[in-house]
């Protein structure tokens, strides 16, 4: 399994629409609205890198997305 | 595939409250079974006979339920679809689980014998259940020593509010406190429950073959180990005291099989939800939410009064005390729920610094729930969970600033979050 964080910057006024569409996406482990450098953080879990590409493509297609940055997880420690 | 997106916080409360509702129903059924057992066997035997019978019958019933939930349906097991997404099928205990199962089984055996003793001396379940809630304070103390996350002031305050509320609720129906029952609660039942909760949580957080452990296997194997301990206890007791409780327990299991099977089937769901909640929240907070049992115990007690000689409060003052207790329990739980701050922290490492050692250093900071080494713009992504933003500064940011390998970090507070469950 491959995990990745997809960091999203949204256009002003489009956050609700992005959230509505993002919640329909497959391979999404969690979805968070944040305050800071980014607006939304998606944690994705996919079988292959190709699936991650499809997911980021789908995200890019959502109306209101200004920029996405993908961070692929190499190692994770969690409680 | 069934996939529900829900806020993780909501899932936690749904699981914990469902578990407490079912637990209240179970206590009602158990009171009824105890009533039947007291009519058949002498009073002092009942805790032992019921304890043994519950785990003998419970192991059989849970085995059947787990096998039923292991049946595949459209590529996933029924249990995985309906109860716990991590469940695939019933399996053998793995080596890494064994130590935790032994300790959880021992805790369950001790707490159960104490529980049935209480039920046999106090027929009113709503006067028995609330004493359980004091266990939150034990758990908080254990977490201070053993867990990564020490309690904040809000957690301590909320736990004390819940505990006091539960105690107030407990004295309202019968109007008096049995000192022997209190000693059993504080010295036997609650310590046993603490051991059970801590090690069930450890089991739930374990990864089995790189997959999250599931609550159904944990429950089944906990029953098996508890049954072994109860059998050892009862055989030793028979040897020392010259009694024949073991044989009488087998007789009780046969005579009251269906009632006990009903109780243990319902208990199965209460535990499975509780274990799942333990995998999400700290043991003390899960226990606090489970304190809602005292609220559910009231309608259950009303129903029981139709069949059993249970006295209800006769004066408005007693009802007032009980009402105040319930309000305190709810207030304590709401206070837990609303005071939580989560954030993502994105970290860049200084050139030449080993990211793997930085990963460990960030992981060792209290309040860090997870940390990932990532490729891309940043080197590490940490997810933190604290009670207040002030704690975020004191506990996280100040620590991050002392780590020499960190070039810069960015804090992104989580405003709302959904998890795929």
Image (cartoon, coloured by chain):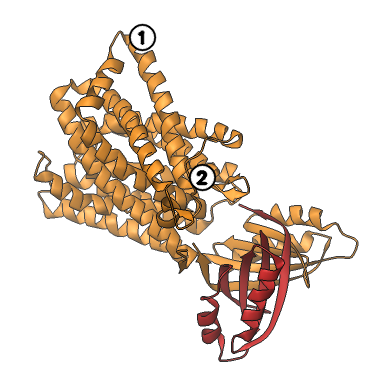
Chain colours: A red, B orange
Front residue of B43/B261: it is: B261
Q: Position of residue B177 (x, y in %)?
A: 24, 37
Label 2 resides on the chain identified as: B
Where is residue B45, by image quadrant?
A: top left
A24 lies above or below B132: below
Left or right, B314 with reference to A34: left
- The mark nearer the N terminus, 2 or 1, is 2
Q: Secondary structure at mark 1?
A: helix
Q: Position of residue B113 (x, y in %)?
A: 34, 28
A3 lies above or below B227: below
Label 1 resides on the chain identified as: B
Q: Is residue B11 visible?
A: yes
Front residue of B410/B179: it is: B410
Left or right, B209 with reference to B129: right
**Which residue is drawn at the image coordinates 20% and 47% (left, top)?**
B172
Q: Position of residue B9 (x, y in %)?
A: 47, 63
Left or right, A32 with reference to B401: left
Q: Secondary structure at mark 2?
A: helix
Q: Position of residue B267 (x, y in %)?
A: 32, 43
**Which residue is drawn at the image coordinates 36% and 9% (left, top)?**
B239
- Residue A60: assigned label: none
Residue that mark 2 sits on: B201
Q: CA distance from mark 2 to mark 1?
A: 35 Å
Residue that mark 1 sits on: B239
């Amino acid at each position: 399994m491959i995990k990745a964080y997809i960091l999203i910057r949204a256009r002003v006024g489009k956050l609700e629409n992005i959230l509505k569409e993002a919640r329909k996406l497959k391979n999404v482990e969690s979805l968070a609205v944040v305050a800071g450098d980014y607006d939304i953080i998606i944690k994705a879990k996919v079988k292959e890198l190709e699936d991650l590409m499809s997911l980021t493509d789908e995200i890019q297609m959502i109306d209101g997305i200004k920029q996405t940055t993908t961070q692929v997880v190499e190692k994770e420690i969690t409680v | 595939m069934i996939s529900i997106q829900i806020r993780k916080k909501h899932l936690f409360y749904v699981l914990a409250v469902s578990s407490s509702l079912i637990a209240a129903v179970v206590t009602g059924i158990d009171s009824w079974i105890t009533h039947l057992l007291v009519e058949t066997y002498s009073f002092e035997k009942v805790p032992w006979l019921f304890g043994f019978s519950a785990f003998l019958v419970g192991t059989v019933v849970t085995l059947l339920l787990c096998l039923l939930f292991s049946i595949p349906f459209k590529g996933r097991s029924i249990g995985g679809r309906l109860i716990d997404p991590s469940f695939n099928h019933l399996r053998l205990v793995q080596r890494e689980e064994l130590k935790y199962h032994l300790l959880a089984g021992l805790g369950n055996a001790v707490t159960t014998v104490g529980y049935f003793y209480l039920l046999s001396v106090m027929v009113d379940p709503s006067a028995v259940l609330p004493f359980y809630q004091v266990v939150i304070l034990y758990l908080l103390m254990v977490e201070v020593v053993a867990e990564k996350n020490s309690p904040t002031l809000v957690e301590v305050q909320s736990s004390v509010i819940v505990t006091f509320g539960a105690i107030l609720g407990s004295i309202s129906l019968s109007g008096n406190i049995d000192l022997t029952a209190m000693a059993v609660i504080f010295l036997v039942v609650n310590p046993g429950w603490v051991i059970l909760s801590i090690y069930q949580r450890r089991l739930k957080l374990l990864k089995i073959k790189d997959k999250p452990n599931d609550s159904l296997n944990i429950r089944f194997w906990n029953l098996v180990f508890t049954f072994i301990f109860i059998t050892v206890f009862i055989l030793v007791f028979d040897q020392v005291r010259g009694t024949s409780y073991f044989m009488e327990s087998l007789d009780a299991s046969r005579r009251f099989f269906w009632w006990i099977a009903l109780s243990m089937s319902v208990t199965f769901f209460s535990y499975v939800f509780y274990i799942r909640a333990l995998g999400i929240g700290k043991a003390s907070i899960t226990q606090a939410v489970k304190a809602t049992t005292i609220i559910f115990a009231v309608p259950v007690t009303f129903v029981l009064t139709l069949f059993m000689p249970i006295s209800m409060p006769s004066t408005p003052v007693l009802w007032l005390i009980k009402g105040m207790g319930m309000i305190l329990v709810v207030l304590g739980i709401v206070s837990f729920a609303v005071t939580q701050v989560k954030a993502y922290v994105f970290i860049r490492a200084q050139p030449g610094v080993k990211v793997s050692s930085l990963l460990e250093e960030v992981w060792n900071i209290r309040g860090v729930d997870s940390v990932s080494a990532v490729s891309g713009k940043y080197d590490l992504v940490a997810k933190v969970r604290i009670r207040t933003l002030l704690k975020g500064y004191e506990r996280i940011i100040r620590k991050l600033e002392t780590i020499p390998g960190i070039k810069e970090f960015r804090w992104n507070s989580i405003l709302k979050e959904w998890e795929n469950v």
